[in-house]
Amino acid sequence: MSTWRTAAHFVAHPPPADWRDDLARRIGRRPRRVGLWTELAMYGARCCLDAAGEAALPAGARIRIASMRGAWGATHAGLTQLDAGLPMPFTFMQSQPALMLAEVGRCLEWQGDASFALCRDAARTLQLAKMGASRDGLLFGIVEEERNGELPRSEWWRLMPD
Amino acid sequence: MNDVYLAGMGLACVLGDDMPSVLASLRHGGVPPTPVAVADGISWPVYALASREGDWTQRLCSTVRSVVAQTDKTGDLGPRTAPLFVASSSLDIGFMEYEKQDLRLGGDLQDFAGVVARALDWQGPVFTVSTACTSALNAVLAAADLIRSAEADEALVIGVEMDNRFTVAGFGAMQLLAPDSAQPFGAQRKGLVLGEAVAALRLTSQPARWQITGGANVVDGRNPSGTEASAVFAMCRGALMQSGLQPGDIDLIKVQAAGSPVNDAIEVEALKQVFDPLPPLVSLKSAIGHTLGAAGAAELALLVGCIEGGVWPTVDYPLDASLGIALSERAPQKLRNILLNVVGFGGGHASLVLKDVGS
C-alpha cells in the first residue's frame, strides 16, 4: 500500500480553553486519574475520529503516537517524589507512554494494535507506522505537553490506504 | 514480500554478559536477585546486571557495545546504516536520578536512543519504541514490517532496561512486586520481580535458521496494570493468522507468566481458549526476572540460546495445581513453531511466532 489519503486531520496547537469540557462531552465522562499528556491524546484522537465521521475505529486499524516530550510533567513529579521518599502510584502510571495508549484505546472503546514510536525525522515515524498496516488504516497522533513556553499540541491524522 | 530471519543475537542479563556465560549460569541453577533500596527501609529484589565501571551512561554504552558485538560471530556489523530500534520502558530515567532537579528532562524522549546509536557509531535511522513490557516485541514487529515490505534488508533491535530506582519504586507503589523471588505460575507466587537486561536481535531478509513468521500487538485499556483474556486470545490468533498457522502447529509457548497471582491465572485461561490441548509451556522470568521493555528481545534471545545450547530453565518451586498446567522440564523433541508471548503494564499484549527452519 504505497498511496494513502487523509480522511481527517485535526489540529489543536494549542487546544481551545474549554478542551477538557469538550472531551468529556464527546466521550460521555470526565477522565479520572490520567495525566495531562494522556488527556491531550484522548482529546485529539476522539476529535480526529469525529472529524472523519467515524463513530468507532475499526478493529483492524492501527494507532501510532509520537511525542518528543512525552509525559514530561508526570515524569518530573515522579522523580521529585522519589527524591522525597517514594513516587505515588498514579504519578508513576501517568509517566508511562503505555498507559497513555491504554487510555486512548479505552476512550475510543477500541482494542487493537497501538504503539508509541518516534524518530528525529518525523516523516520516518509516519512511514514506519504505515508499513504493514491493514486496509482499516491508521490513526496517527503527535501529542506534546506544554514546556518552557512551547505550546501544548495534539495533532492527529486519520489515514486510509487507497 | 520478503521473509524475516534472525541473523544474530546478543544478551546481557543477571545470568551473565554473553550467551555462553548466561547458559553456564543457567546450567548451575541461576543467580538470585539482589535487593535494591528505593527509600529508607524499603527495598525490592531485582535480577540485576553485573556491575561495570563508569557512570550510568558509560555503563549503558559499554553494555550495548558488548551485546551488539555478540550478534555477529565475525564482529563485523557492516556499514551500520540499517534501521536501529531502541526499545525500552524506562529509557534514561536512571541517568536522570543522578541529575540535579533543574537539569532533569531538559532533552527529549529520543535522547536515550541517540546515546545508544552514538555508542555504536550508528549511521542509519534510529527509532525509539516505548510501550512498557511489550516495547522490544513491538520493535521487532516494526522492524519486520520494514524488511517484509523491502524498505530495509536488515534491522537491529536493542532492548534495554538499565538500573534505576524510579521503576522499582513505581512498581512497588503499585503493589505489583514480590518480596523475594519470581515464581511464574507458582503456588506461592506473590508478584513479579524486575530484571535488568540489554538484548540485541539482528534481523535480516537473508535466510537463516530462525524465521519470524508473524506477530501481533493488541492493546486493551480496560485493565491497565493487568492481563485481559480477550486480548491474549486476540494476540495469539493474530500471530497465528499472520504466520499461516493453526493452534495445533505450535510446539512450544514461551508464556508471559510474571508471577502475578491474578494475571498468571488469566493468561492460562485465555491460552486454553486458543489451544486445546495446550502445547508445552516454558517460562523464563524465574531465571532473569521481568525485564520490562527489554523482555521481548531478552527472552527471545535466551530461549533461542537455550535451544541451541541444549540448556533448559529449571522450575524449583511448586506450581499452582489449580491452573492445571505444567512447565516443560526440557525442550520438546518436536520444535518447529514457537509462540512467544509478552503481556504488560498499560494493557499491552504482544505475540511473535518463531520458526526453526532447520528443524
Image (cartoon, coloured by chain):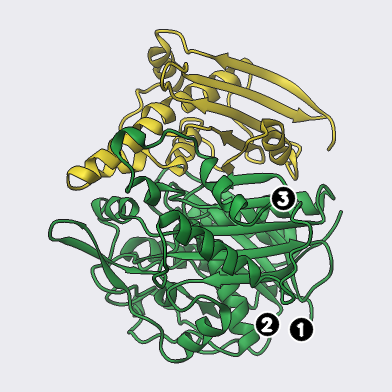
Chain colours: A yellow, B green
Counting residues from the N terminus, which is met first, the one under dot 3 or under dot 1? 3
**Residue sticking out furthest to the top:** A17
- Left or right of B73, for residue B58: left
Residue A155 visible somewhere in the drawing: yes
Do marks 2 and 1 both belong to one polypeptide chain? yes
Q: Amino acid at mark 3?
A: Pro
The kind of residue on which mark 1 rests is Ser
Q: Residue beneath label 3, please?
A: B83
Percent across and percent down for residue B4 are 78, 62
Q: Chain of mark 3?
A: B
Q: Earlier in the sequence, mark 2 or mark 3?
A: 3
Which residue is at the front of the view, B182 or B170?
Answer: B170
Question: Is B157 on the left-hand or right-hand side of B348?
Answer: right
Give the camera-side residue of A46 and A74: A74
- Same chain assignment for discs 3 and 1: yes
The residue under the point 83% across, 70% down is B207
Q: Percent x, y for residue B79?
A: 78, 57
The residue that label 2 is drawn on is B335
Mark 2 to mark 1 CA distance (whole Å): 7 Å
Residue drawn at (42%, 74%), measured in percent from left and top? B14
Q: Quadrant of residue A37?
A: top left
Contact between labelled residues 1 and 2, with CB atoms less than 8 Å apart: yes
Q: Which residue is mark 1?
A: B359
Q: Is residue B254 above or below residue B91?
A: below
Q: Could you tell me which secondary element the residue under label 2 belongs to?
A: loop
Estimate how packed mark 2 is, as few (under 14), some (14 to 19) or many (20 or more) residues with alpha carbons within 10 Å: some
